[in-house]
Image (tube, rainbow, N blue to C red):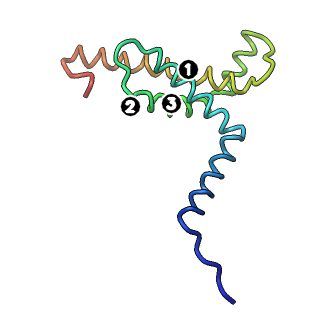
């Protein structure tokens, strides 16, 4: 009996692309994409210097915020607004990514102000 040949680089890349595609089309992937979009919107709303590095970090952090806090945000949105029709989970994911990045910007602002007060460089 012959063993089948090892999959090549192309087959492995296609396999992993299919796995990522299956994850993105699932509930968790859609929430992560919505949160990343919320993080990017928050990055675009930033006044002053908009570095690409900051945008990537905000998209990743927005994605994580969405995965963990979108159920809480969904409950808050339904309480404040009422019943949401359509993609309520996507709206909650986007809002949690946006709110998470706003909260992170507030915390970083406090840290940078404290660093300036102590005489340090906030960009370090």
Find numbered disc 3 in the image and state the secondary structure of the residue it sits on.
Answer: helix
Q: CA distance from mark 3 to mark 2?
A: 10 Å
- In which image quadrant can residue 7 be found? bottom right
Residue at (66%, 87%) from the top-left corner? Answer: 2
* Disc 2 target residue: 53
* Secondary-structure class at tag 2: helix
C-alpha span from label 3 to label 1: 10 Å
Q: Residue at x 65, y 32 (%)?
A: 31
Q: Which residue is mark 3?
A: 59
Residue 73 left/right relative to 53: right
Quarter of the figure with residue 120? top left
Closer to the chain start, of discs 3 and 1, is 3
Distance, label 1 to label 2, CA atoms, is 17 Å
- 113 w.r.t. 60: above or below: above
Q: Residues within 10 Å of mark 1 (few under 14, many from 20)?
A: many
State which mark lies toward you, 1 or 2.
2
Task: Point out residue 124 in the picture as x, y percentages from the top left corner.
Answer: 25, 28
Residue at the farthest bottom position: 1
Which mark sits nearer the N-terminus, 1 or 2?
2
Q: Residue at x 72, y 27 (%)?
A: 89
Give the residue pinned by disc 1.
98
| Quarter of the N terminus within the rendering | bottom right
Alpha-carbon neighbours of circle 2 within 10 Å: few (<14), some, or many (≥20)?
few
Residue 68 visible in the displayed image: no
Relative side of 8 to 55, left or right: right
Q: Secondary structure at mark 1?
A: helix
- The disc, 3 or 2, on the residue closer to the chain's N-terminal end is 2
Taking 80 as reference, is 14 left or right? left
Position of residue 99 measured from the top left corner of the image (x, y, whole percent)? 56, 19
Choose between 10 and 94: the one closer to the eye: 10
């Amino acid at each position: 009996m012959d063993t089948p040949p090892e999959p090549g680089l192309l087959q492995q890349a296609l396999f992993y692309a299919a796995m990522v595609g299956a994850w993105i089309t699932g509930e968790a992937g859609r929430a992560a994409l919505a949160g990343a979009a919320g993080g990017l919107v928050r990055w675009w709303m930033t006044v002053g210097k908009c570095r690409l590095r900051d945008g990537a970090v905000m998209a990743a952090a927005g994605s994580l915020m969405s995965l963990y806090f979108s159920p809480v945000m969904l409950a808050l949105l339904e309480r404040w607004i009422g019943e949401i029709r359509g993609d309520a989970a996507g709206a909650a994911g986007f809002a949690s990514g946006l709110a998470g990045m706003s909260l992170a910007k507030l915390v970083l602002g406090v840290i940078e102000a404290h660093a300036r007060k102590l005489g340090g460089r906030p960009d370090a």
